[in-house]
Amino acid sequence: MDFKLLYTKNNQQGILRHFKFNDSANNKIIDLSEAKQYPIQGLIFAENLKSDDFLAGFESEIKFYPVRSHEEFGINADQFENLGYEDGKKIFDKMRENWVLQNNLSLIEELFKIRNHLLGLWPNDRAGFFEELWFLLKSNLGASDLKLIYNDIIKSKNENEKNKLVKVKVQGERFPELTSCDEIDDQILKSYEKEFSNSMQITEYNKEKGQVVLCGAIKKSPVIVMANIFQLTRLQKVLLNSLFEGLNM
């Protein structure tokens, strides 16, 4: 799978390197103030730039991707600019695996608290529920992008009319965007209609392409998760299954 890493060049600029499998990587110099506009999977900062002010600017980014010092990998900016795919992936794997593991452990520690919070949103704020679930799944899978498809209910404003069932999708690379489902999404739901249960099941997983489809249900309402991921561990499988079982208790 392709991935993008950002290396701090100085206090104002960074080197954004796009690593492509079986293809040459390319570099782009960007302003660090604009980094949030790019789909980035990891940030490496030069230790000599480390300061309270500098790190404060990236403190909130840790929930989106791993942030690590260049000293952990013994690589400078010039070496980063010429890094090949395989060497870049070794660095990225080390960053990502540690970051995902920390997210997994945090979810284990807060599982009941998170479950209760989500269930509090479920009856009256279905959009808020799935936005938070999207963030939770994305960070615990370490996904580069993720899409959720689910059913929502639009309550009728007229006593003589029934509530309306609609299909909604939440997708994005950095933030979740809620939109109505199209015909393709409807077809996806129909094709997996026999796969829904109270647990989260891995319906399809292409390890080479890094594509995974998970099917489950929350309170008997079907949910499909489609994501591009770099790894799927036993811990992730058990943890996500436990989360969905907890949401159905």
Image (cartoon, rainbow, N blue to C red):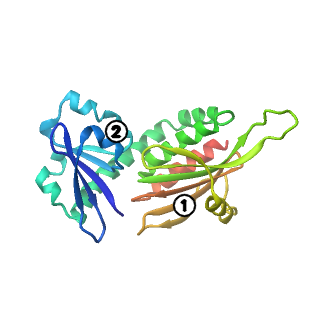
Question: x and y percent of residue 228 in the render?
Answer: 45, 58
Q: Residues within 10 Å of mark 2 (few under 14, many from 20)?
A: some
Residue shown at the point (28%, 61%) measured from the top left: 19
Residue at 29% x, 50% y is 95
- 202 or 60: which is nearer to us? 60
Residue 235 place in picture, x, y as percent: 46, 53
Q: Relative to the observer, which residue lies in front, 163 or 95? A: 163
Q: Position of residue 213 (x, y in %)?
A: 54, 61
In the rendered view, tell whether residue 46 sits above or below residue 85: above
Residue placed under numbered mark 2 in the picture: 61
Residues at marks 1 and 2, CA–CA distance in whole angstroms: 26 Å
Q: Please state, as top left, top right, bottom left or bottom right, where the N terminus lies in the image.
A: bottom left
* Displayed quadrant of residue 85: bottom left
Residue 22 lies, with reference to residue 134, above or below; the image says below
User: What residue sits right under mark 1 in the picture?
Assistant: 213
Could you tell me the amino acid type at mark 2? Glu
| Secondary structure category for the residue under label 1 | strand
What is the residue that sits farthest to the top in this orientation?
52
| Residue 77 position in % (x across, y down) | 13, 50
User: Could you tell me which quadrant the C terminus lies in?
Assistant: top right
